């Protein structure tokens, strides 16, 4: 099965950026050459990770990065999105770990030598444990520590970085980590969740100021995740529940960035659950963005619950991915056009999109046709948003290779490249070949 785009597709224009994405904790391994992070602690807590695994070795990328760069280059992508492990750069005592910086410098040089644009995310959830020991994101100081870390990184990396994203999906670091309790550090407390969200956004704003100073030529921005919130029924209560969920999970992050205020739902929270906001914070948060990264996987359905709040209704009808997430490509067009209508947006990149499938190599091949279909549908959904008048400058597949899928461990495979975790052998799946063909066809046209 192939991925087919019309020759007139805006995705085939020469400037449209295609890439693949990963994150540090999910692939790097080599845990002994960095500080422990909150995910190490979480993994070491029995019952937190479904398969009882951890990130100590992962895809052993720190040792195999040369091979992985060849893999990326072989796909014919324009860009590679990676994240930096904070604890590989700044030690517990505050000193800079030069070996950690050197690892990334070599990697960035190798990408540059192959003409691959580096999209660097500074924080993809792996907060150093030494900061967690001081309160982590609940402590306002962590936001200032993040700006210092951004300063060290952006000075060291110089012109090697095409784009910096401050944070990946603050929704997850706030809600999943501090309200749902399913991500590290595993807390369930609404006030804390809202406070963490606020400190993350503050950290973003402070780091943006640093990046615009140190890397004024880079595209500097943030990566947010979006899921359209649909009502389970047309009842007024469910419609209201879906709207609250949208405010709480989607608008909570984008509105402060673009308009300097939280959604009105904030005022409906009991005072004890509202975040503390210091004077001037909202102006810091609303720094101009060079780009907005949008991650999209699925939609979410909500119903009203007895507490006057919303509850999600997990999907049961196929087509579902191996995560149990509904395959709903039109939701991508919907979230994109919805934010296009609501806000004055900077250029948008789809920074993550992909699906977990129960892949099994058969005679050395992985025929992940369902994933090929997923990419086909979501590329068309992206195209539809562009054709409706929105500016979208790039698309990144999640993920380059199978990796540590957080609370799910290694059981869920999102890669376009299959990883055998015993031999660490990488094998292109059918989806990698289908995407590679799209990229190659495009280069021939240039
Ligand atoms: C996103 C994360 C990414 C990956 C995908 C499946 O929320 O940013 O690290 O786990 O989900």
Image (spheres, helix red, strand yellow):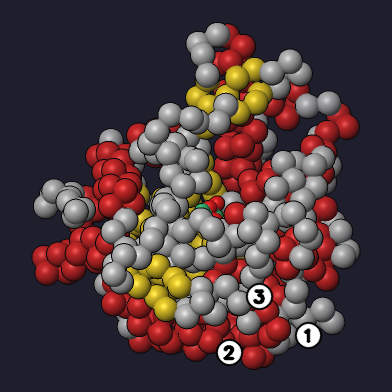
Which structural element holds mark 3?
loop
Ligand 1 is in which quadrant of the figure?
bottom right
Cα distance between the residues tagged 1 and 3: 23 Å
Residue at 88%, 32% in the rendered image: 272
Which numbered dot is residue 102?
Answer: 2
Which numbered dot is residue 95?
Answer: 1
Provide residue 249's location: percent of width, then percent of height: 61, 37
Q: Which label's residue is closer to the chain start, 1 or 3?
A: 3
272, above or below 223, in the image:
above
Q: Is residue 422 visible?
A: yes
Which numbered dot is residue 56?
Answer: 3
Provide residue 203's location: percent of width, then percent of height: 70, 58
Residue at 28%, 47% in the rendered image: 373
Provide residue 229's location: percent of width, then percent of height: 52, 29
43, above or below 383, in the image:
below
Residue at 58%, 9% in the rendered image: 236
Q: Which residue lies furthest to the top in this view?
A: 235
């Amino acid at each position: 099965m192939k991925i087919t785009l019309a020759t007139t597709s805006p995705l085939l224009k020469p400037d449209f950026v295609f890439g693949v994405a990963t994150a540090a904790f999910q692939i790097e391994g080599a845990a002994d050459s960095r500080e422990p992070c909150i995910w190490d602690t979480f993994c070491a807590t029995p019952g937190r990770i479904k398969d009882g695994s951890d990130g100590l070795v992962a895809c052993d990328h720190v040792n195999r990065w040369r091979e992985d760069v060849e893999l990326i280059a072989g796909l014919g992508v324009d860009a590679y999105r990676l994240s930096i492990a904070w604890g590989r750069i700044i030690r517990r005592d505050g000193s800079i770990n030069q070996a950690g910086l050197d690892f990334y410098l070599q990697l960035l040089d190798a990408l540059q030598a192959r003409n691959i644009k580096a999209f660097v995310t500074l924080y993809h959830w792996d907060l150093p444990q030494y900061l967690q020991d001081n309160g982590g994101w609940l402590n306002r100081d962590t936001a200032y520590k993040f700006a210092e870390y951004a300063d060290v990184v952006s000075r060291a990396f110089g012109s090697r970085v095409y784009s910096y994203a401050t944070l990946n999906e603050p929704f997850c670091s706030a809600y999943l980590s501090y309200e749902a309790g399913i991500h590290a550090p595993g807390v369930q407390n609404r006030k804390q969740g809202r406070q963490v969200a606020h400190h993350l956004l503050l950290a973003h704003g402070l780091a943006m100021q640093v990046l615009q100073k140190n890397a004024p030529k880079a595209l500097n921005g943030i990566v947010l995740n979006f899921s359209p919130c649909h009502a389970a029924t047309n009842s007024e209560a469910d419609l209201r529940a879906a709207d609250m969920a949208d405010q709480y999970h989607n608008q909570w992050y984008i509105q402060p960035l673009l308009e300097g205020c939280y959604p009105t739902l904030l005022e409906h929270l009991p005072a004890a659950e509202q975040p503390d906001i210091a004077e001037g914070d909202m102006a810091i948060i609303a720094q101009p963005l060079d780009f907005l990264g949008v991650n999209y996987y699925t939609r979410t359905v909500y119903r009203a619950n007895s507490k006057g709040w919303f509850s999600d209704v997990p999907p049961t009808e196929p087509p579902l991915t191996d995560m149990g997430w509904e395959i709903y490509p039109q939701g991508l067009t919907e979230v994109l056009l919805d934010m296009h209508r609501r806000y004055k947006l900077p250029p948008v990149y789809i920074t993550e999109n992909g699906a977990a499938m129960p892949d099994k190599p058969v005679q050395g091949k992985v025929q992940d046709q369902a994933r090929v279909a997923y990419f086909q549908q979501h590329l068309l959904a992206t195209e539809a948003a562009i054709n409706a008048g929105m500016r979208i400058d790039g698309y990144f597949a999640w993920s380059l290779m199978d990796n540590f899928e957080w609370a799910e461990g290694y059981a869920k495979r999102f890669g376009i490249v299959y990883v055998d975790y015993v031999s660490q052998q990488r094998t292109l799946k059918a989806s990698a070949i289908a995407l590679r063909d799209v990229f190659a066809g495009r280069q021939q046209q240039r």
